[in-house]
Image (cartoon, helix red, strand yellow):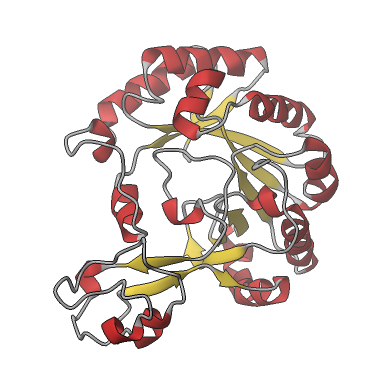
Amino acid sequence: MASEMRSGRPLIIDIKGNSLDDGPGTRSVVFMKGCPLNCVWCQNPESKKIGPELWFEADKCVVSGGCIPACPEGALAADEPLAIDRNKCSLCFDCVDACPSTALKRVGQDMPVEQVVAKIVPYKPFFDTTGGGATLSGGEPTLFMEFTSQLLQALKAEGIHTLVETAGLFNFDAFAEMILPHTDMIYMDMKIIDPELHKRWCGVDNRRIKENFARLHKMAGGVGGFSIKPRTPLIPGITDTDEMMASLAEFYLAHGVKLAALEKNNPIWFDKSEKVGVEPDFAADDPARSFYDNQRYGGIKQFFEDQGITILES
């Protein structure tokens, strides 16, 4: 099943050295490839598939033509220099090697734990000064539980604060054994409460996700233990409706959740989808293609806080 953890190690999309958006303080964020969900609004569409992908930024292309003869499959053509026939592409990445600019890139690099840690450790002075650390993101870090566990242990051995961002679809016993002992903080997505609607928009139902969150939230907060923060993306007309917000608040209150985060829709994911050859299933004038309305956000935030649920900055 897609939700089961995999052996081996994930491909690494990127290691962002100085991030202020993925946890407290200054952080280094490790983006892993592969996710058991298929959210239509995924902010990192290049992280969905486990395998490598070809990334193309047309505005960086200098139209040198060097990539065309380099492609053994004929997926690039002289009469359409800014187009790729993804059906022909075999992902050999010969075109990337021939590209004189950075218009063509491979998404997903094989990196052992030691190499990942070596890229993060130089930022430790910034972590220590700002209360930051390392954040494991994706994709879904728990899809590769053994690798993620080893990486977390190596980071903790360097005295680095650790945070795991997860969609919550994992084997709880394995998570409790391999991830929790080495994790200081968890950011867990609570996208949609209704299982059928979650399946419609995210590809799977969320029964296990809700069960995992409830168990983790009950365990959190002990002396020397981990903390957990649920987060909900506000996607216009999908996750942010009055009914959705009411069901989310009801779920939080039932489980004693007093702190949560709301994330405003950021439409940059449309452009990112096209760069890996995926056409988003939204009309040009769909509200999901716009930055989130601040007034609507303020109203939703007030709704939760009126019920005793404090909305934190994400």
Quadrant in the picture for the N terminus: top right
Vertical placement of residue 157 versus 279, above or below: below
Q: Would you say 285 lies left or right of 125 here?
A: left
Residue 63, by quadrant, is: bottom left
Horizontal placement of 168 versus 145: left or right?
Answer: left
Could you say which is closer to the camera, residue 67 or residue 253? 67
At a point 63% along the width and 70% down the height, the residue shown is 124
- Residue 291 seen anywhere in this rendered image of the structure: no
Can residue 218 be seen at all in this image of the molecule?
yes
User: Which of the 4 image quadrants contains residue 72?
Assistant: bottom left
Residue 4 in the image: state x and y as whole percent. 72, 43
- Image-based side of 265 in relation to 189, left or right: left
Where is residue 165 shown, x and y percent of the image? 60, 46
Q: Nearer the viewer, residue 152 or 100?
A: 100
Q: Where in the figure is residue 83, as x and y percent of width and height?
A: 23, 66
User: In this picture, is 32 found above or below 313?
Assistant: below
Residue ID at (77%, 67%) = 154
Please name whichever residue, 109 or 256, is drawn nearer the observer in this view of the structure: 109
Quadrant of the rendered structure where residue 296 is?
A: top left
Image position of 242 with respect to 227: above or below: above
Number of numbered discs:
0
Residue 305 x %, y %: 47, 18
- Residue at screen point 30% across, 64% down: 85
Most foreground residue, 206 or 291: 206
Task: Tell me what residue is drawn at x 19 percent, y 81 percent.
Answer: 62
* Image position of 182 with respect to 107: above or below: above
